Image: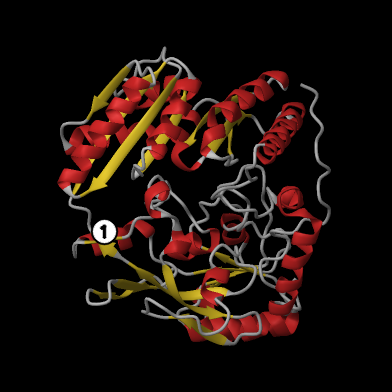
Amino acid sequence: MISQEAKKKFLGIVGEKNYLDSKQSLVAYSYDATPNYQALPDAVLKPRNTQEVSEIVKVCNEYKIPIVPRGNATNLCAGTCPLEGGIVLIFNHINQILEIDEENLTVTVQPGLITLDMINAVEAKGLFYPPDPSSMKISTIGGNINECSGGLRGLKYGVTRDYVIALETVLPNGNIIRTGGKLAKDVAGYDFTRLMVGSEGTLGVITEATFKLIPMPEAKKTMLALYDSLESAGRTVSKIIANKIIPTTLEFLDQPTIRVVEDFAKIGLPTDVGAVLLIEQDGPIEVVEKDINRIAEICEEEKALSVQVAQTVEEGTALTTARRSALSALARLKPTTILEDATVPRSKIAEMVREIEEIAKRNNVQICTFGHAGDGNLHPTCMTDARDKEEMHRVEIAFEEIFEKAIELGGTITGEHGVGVMKSPYLAWKLGEEGVEAMKTLKLAFDPNNIMNPGKMFAKESRKRVVVTR
């Protein structure tokens, strides 16, 4: 609970209009996009600038009040669910593009800015910011940084951390630091900038960010390849990379996902094929033409049933719609949709998808799989009903077995969604207990009072590894 003394200090900082503690307001900020997690904060604060954020954090540190920095809560790991109460910080007022520097190829923005608004603004200048999370129409830059968001273009261009070059951050004691800069080289001290990216709000509050940009690609082409088997699609992915071609996008949908997506998007996908690869390449016109032609040859060599190359921008957009609409399409099937992101080496994709099918069958749950085939980041998605406790128990067991298999194949429990609360019991499966302890030591050094997004990343008790008899 927030004492009257602390509340008075908060009101003095942000004013009555920017301090919310009505029941309606607290409920609105009690959950994020993660199914089955909800907890009321004690208050919601809307700071108007970095100095107000600093003053708020100092009060929280003094009274040991938990702080949950929140964007638009599109995350899928319960990362912004205020499980320990305290205050939720939202950044409606801190949401501007501060500068687009065309000489240094950078953009400097505030954390409340919508991702797509930044992308559109830099593209209007002929510049390119590649990370494209599926939630980019509503997610915020601050959230992207805290979760190190990925996207369909991650294979060729990388993820959020590959573009953040400078940050302004309020530390848990209220101090304001600036790290990085508009520099091609900077090795002065520890790399706090990269440390903050993906820290899920557990080390500080980001109040400003500078990203590097690149020139807009000259051309782009999109294609769709259909297969009768997962294995053929998987071999195609490996062979494309082995031919030293790195596509912009190399996405995968299994048959159950294809059926649901076609019913939803109605773009003419055949629903009787075993797998679909969506492939996109960009760059100089000559390179794009050469790569797409060679990729088409590889698809045919690996027994693709058909290869369709979009002839217009509109056709290409229609094809990418198939992938981007996957979650929306699946979400129509049952009241609760759980989207996960187990990741394996790309050479293990077919084996992992087959194992997911077996796990779903063994536990009698409905799971469809799609994802970023080029970087091995798969999204097994379970359609269920959170009100059915017995089924939810089977869902939990199924995902534990999926995480176990991913690690067995040299993968990880999360490629882009983050740890938050959902994955925290399994973090030691990937890092080992010693690795988790090292991270806790770092957290303690930054945040000795544990006010920054407590309860995230580190579980009170690690889950025991599952032993599956196959």
Between residue 438 and residue 300, name the one nearer to us: 300
Q: Position of residue 397 (x, y in %)?
A: 75, 32
- Compared across the picture, whether 29 is left or right of 139 comes to right
- Compared across the picture, whether 267 is left or right of 132 comes to left
Residue 470 appears anywhere in the view: yes
Residue visible at 38% across and 51% down in the picture: 132
Residue 450 appears anywhere in the view: no
Q: Is residue 132 above or below residue 18?
A: above
Residue visible at 25% across and 46% down in the picture: 282
Q: Is residue 150 above or below residue 349?
A: below
- Compared across the picture, whether 139 is left or right of 390 comes to left
Please name the residue that numbered disc 1 is placed on. 120
Mark 1 lies on a secondary structure that is helix
Quarter holding residue 48 = bottom left
Q: Is residue 347 above or below residue 85?
A: above
- Which residue in the rendered view is the most extreme toward the top? 272
Residue visible at 39% across and 29% down in the picture: 277
